[in-house]
Image: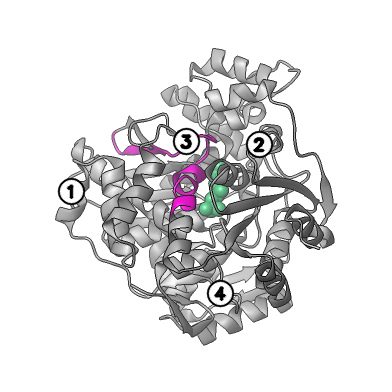
Amino acid sequence: MFYQSTRDSSVRLTSAEAIVRGISPDGGLFAPEELPKLSLDDIVGYGGMSYAEAAADIFSRCLTDFTSAEIKNCVESAYCSGSFETENAMELKNLKKGLNILELWHGPTCAFKDMALQILPHLLTTSVRKTGTDKKVCVLVATSGDTGKAALEGFKDAPGAEILVFYPENGVSAMQKLQMITQSGSNVGVCAIKGNFDDAQTGVKKIFTDKDVAAKLSENGLVFSSANSINWGRLAPQIVYYIYSYSKLIACGEIKAGDCINVVVPTGNFGNILAAYYAKQMGVPVKKLICASNSNNVLTDFLRTGVYDRNRRFYTTISPSMDILMSSNLERLLWHLSGKNSDYIRSLFAELSETGRFEVSEDIKSQLCDLFWADFCTDAETVSAIRNTFESYSYTVDTHTGVAVGVYEKYLAATGDRTPVVIASTASPYKFPEAVLKALGSEKSFRDEFEMADELFKISGLAIPMALSELKTKPPRFTGSVEKSEMLGYVYSALNIK
Ligand SMILES: *Cc1c(COP(=O)(O)O)cnc(C)c1O
């Protein structure tokens, strides 16, 4: 199986090469030329396997240049080493017939990013070895809150790797910030930037694709890679949980083999929902991919009209990990839907960078319309969705999942479609306790996030994750912040490059 740059079809790589490089020098992303097809029997079979076993089988079909021993080692290091608090990494909760929540936040940082970032360091270091580089990998990350911490946890003290994380100074929750600035490990760096997530992501992309910077790193025995969802090594692991969920719904009798499901995904950078699209292309019977946004609803408009227009106000919301106007992974989807037309994609994204806007062809519009349904929730609507869910099912969701639940309510009202649904739940409610408490009607005021967590426990009865309660006593290590123009300077100084 080979991977092509979405902007230049002559760039054609194995998965190991695509994972090491992260992004193509032409600015394109690496996407699979052909996806492997699973039979219904294959999928049903996963229902009797552990998460790690199913993941190994799915990886062996996507990462065809990896040996089965390499895959087994990566999968077991990630999913069988005790870093997830549940037996099968994820958890499916059935709230009532036809309504299923896919909890993806039982890893070390309590957000779904762990599902991929616990395995990415293993995929990356294996890939580096396979491609014969003797260089040390420097992983650069731009984060809207959750990726940064999950990447830091995945990469801390990994041999042959350094990791540097940039986050928007005022764009992450207090708990997210604490998680990052207290990070342990000898090979880690964390820096705030004066700007929003898009600034951080643009800055990182610029550093990545700068040839002079790459040459300077190389002289110093280093090579950049990416842990953002632009890296194929992030996306492949996310496909697994959609396939595995479907097999588990069959195994527990919620659906019959071959039945369609709908999938709702709270979306920011379009990585998670793209993984669901890939799962559908590989054979999972998904009827609609329901894309849920917050007030930064650029994707809602795009999926409805075919016009992507980022010239709009940026909102800071209670679901900060979705405060994004430039959804990178959309580029991969459009490449597939355009019939892998890299010239077309290059021109679309050139237009986007010049004018902040593009409009896709009629053919792509009609494919989008068949595949997706999209809507958004304001903060007030998200709060109601969290409250309704608690009142109806005694079940607590975080603010991001609240957006998904709220959009699903809108979908039901608009379509009446009762197809069984899987709603991706992307973070523990304890990562955003202030907003969740307000939604559940608590009017008290609190000294800090930890008091909030205690109160949330009293109301919800949901256990507080150890990874969050232990932050209370951890001293901050990384308190610096830089202008967005100074990101490269920070990288050089953190890596001791003159
Ligand atoms: C990252 C994140 C999202 C958005 O996922 P994308 O793959 O960027 O679309 C949603 N919810 C939470 C909690 C996240 O951390």
**Which residue is under mark 1?**
44
Foreground disc of the pair 1, 2: 2
Local SS, label 3:
loop
Q: Are marks 2 and 3 in contact (CB under 8 Å)?
A: no
Sequence-first tag of 1 and 2: 1
**Where's residue 246, x and y in %?**
27, 47
Q: Quadrant of residue 309?
A: bottom right
**Where's residue 434, x and y in %?**
67, 27
- The residues bearing labels 3 and 1 have C-alpha atoms spaced at a distance of 26 Å
Q: Which region of the structure is painted magenta? A: 97-122
418 vs 378, left or right, is left
Sequence-first tag of 4 and 3: 4
Indicate yes or no whether the magenta region holds residue 353: no
Local SS, label 4:
loop
Type of amino acid under label 4: Ser
Sequence-first tag of 2 and 3: 3
**Which residue is under mark 4?**
24
